[in-house]
């Protein structure tokens, strides 16, 4: 527990990457009190697993079905109700942190990731339906999602931008956030209540890069690069964050009450069992960041004896060097990011579609 407190004190808020009715009825309140959990993130895959794998939703499914609700409408009711209840659990922390933490995220329908206008409509609908000030609406950082982010921020919706894999796309995400704030300010609206995080995905980068490194014939020349790309990529994302938050553009907005769009380290559970379970935790501790952890990563982090991490700011040069080494081997992180974005959308869409079928079956039971 002391290590979790150290991480928080160092400036990295710990959020839990999971939500279910079992958690709402039991462990979530405990995690808030004892595990330094300061927020919750969800995604379509998390909700699909929660609803399909639990009997706690059955009565509500049947009740709503009897009222003529469609399967999708039932899913909307179940997920927004869970998120609303989680928001209420975090209400005290939300107030004491002046709105920085105590946040709960819910994602727009993954089928809308390539549709700007529909994403905006659903984002506004989710904000109205949950009706809690500490909600974050998750919007994928696709090309089509970028203008949706700007317009939602302009409309007063706090946004969690998800599925960011590259530095170049992250730069566009920051710009989309700042544009939204600028437009809102020019409309004469308050920007001091708008918050945002930018979810930069980590472990999936290593999974893809390591697979490409494994295809290189002379493994003796590349073995030292495995398990390094994801952290280096994230470290350089933080460098960009620092640069942009020192710009005149940001300073003007901050003077008008704007809040930082904090980098959020997502996908922080290791995929390769040979790697330390806290690889994407103790390497990415930095001021004004968030680390959203699955339960296994949270427990592994809580079991650490102490922290001995090199500050992110001291690793910019070595991270540049590592990515340059990858590029010299023909591994293009921009191309990797495009592939991971497409795969990420599919990993959210497939379970969401399966959940719809599961709810349809439950409606007839």
Image (cartoon, helix red, strand yellow):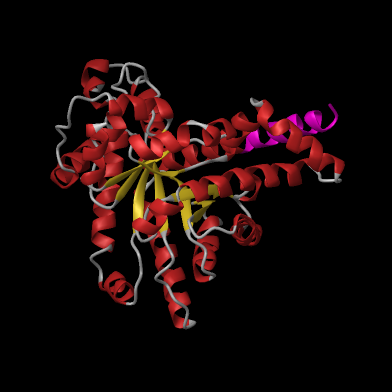
Question: Magenta segment range?
Answer: 349-365
In the rendered structure, the answer to whether residue 53 lies left or right of residue 310 reads right
* Residue 294 within the magenta-colored segment of the rendering: no
Image quadrant occupied by the C terminus: top right
* Residue 353 within the magenta-colored segment of the rendering: yes
Q: Position of residue 251 (x, y in %)?
A: 27, 72
Image quadrant occupied by the N terminus: top left
User: Residue at horizontal 44%, vertical 65%?
Assistant: 194
Question: As rendered, which of 177 and 142 lies closer to the eye?
Answer: 177
User: Residue at horizontal 48%, vertical 56%?
Assistant: 134
Q: Is residue 152 above or below residue 183?
A: above
Question: As rendered, which of 291 and 240 lies closer to the eye?
Answer: 291
User: Residue at horizontal 26%, vertical 47%?
Assistant: 236
Q: Is residue 27 above or below residue 342?
A: above
Q: Position of residue 120 (x, y in %)?
A: 61, 61
Total numbered labels:
0
Question: Can the viewer see residue 288?
Answer: yes
In the rendered structure, the answer to whether residue 273 lies left or right of residue 338 reads left
Q: Is residue 244 above or below residue 345?
A: below
In the rendered structure, the answer to whether residue 150 lies left or right of residue 249 reads right
């Amino acid at each position: 527990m002391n290590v979790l407190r150290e991480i928080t004190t160092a400036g990295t808020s710990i959020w839990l990457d999971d939500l279910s009715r079992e958690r709402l009825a039991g462990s979530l309140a405990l995690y808030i009190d004892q595990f330094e959990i300061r927020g919750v993130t969800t995604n379509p895959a998390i909700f699909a697993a929660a609803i399909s794998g639990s009997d706690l939703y059955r009565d509500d499914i049947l009740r709503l079905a009897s009222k003529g609700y469609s399967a999708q409408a039932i899913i909307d009711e179940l997920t927004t109700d869970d998120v609303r209840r989680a928001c209420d659990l975090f209400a005290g922390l939300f107030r004491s942190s002046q709105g920085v933490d105590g946040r709960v995220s819910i994602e727009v329908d993954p089928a809308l990731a390539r549709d700007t206008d529909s994403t905006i409509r659903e984002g506004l609908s989710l904000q109205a339906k949950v009706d809690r000030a500490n909600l974050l609406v998750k919007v994928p950082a696709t090309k089509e999602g970028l203008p949706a982010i700007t317009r939602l921020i302009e409309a007063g919706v706090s946004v969690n931008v998800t599925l960011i894999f590259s530095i170049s796309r992250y730069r566009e995400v920051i710009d989309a956030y700042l544009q939204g704030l600028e437009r809102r300010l020019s409309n004469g609206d308050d920007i001091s209540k708008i918050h945002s995080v930018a979810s930069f995905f980590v472990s999936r980068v290593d999974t893809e890069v390591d697979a490409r490194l494994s295809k290189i014939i002379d493994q003796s020349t590349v073995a030292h690069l495995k398990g390094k790309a994801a952290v280096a990529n994230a470290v350089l994302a933080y460098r960009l964050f620092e640069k942009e938050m020192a710009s005149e553009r940001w300073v003007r907005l901050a003077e008008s009450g704007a809040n930082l769009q904090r980098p959020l380290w997502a996908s922080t559970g290791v995929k390769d069992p040979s790697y330390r379970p806290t690889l994407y935790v103790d390497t990415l501790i930095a001021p004004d960041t968030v680390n959203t952890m699955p339960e296994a990563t949270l427990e592994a982090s809580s079991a650490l004896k102490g922290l001995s991490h090199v500050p992110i700011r001291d690793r910019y040069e070595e991270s540049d060097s590592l990515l340059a080494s990858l590029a010299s081997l023909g591994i293009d992180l921009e191309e990797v990011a495009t592939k991971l974005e497409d795969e990420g959308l599919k990993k959210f869409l497939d379970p969401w579609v399966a959940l719809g079928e599961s709810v349809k079956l439950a409606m007839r039971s």
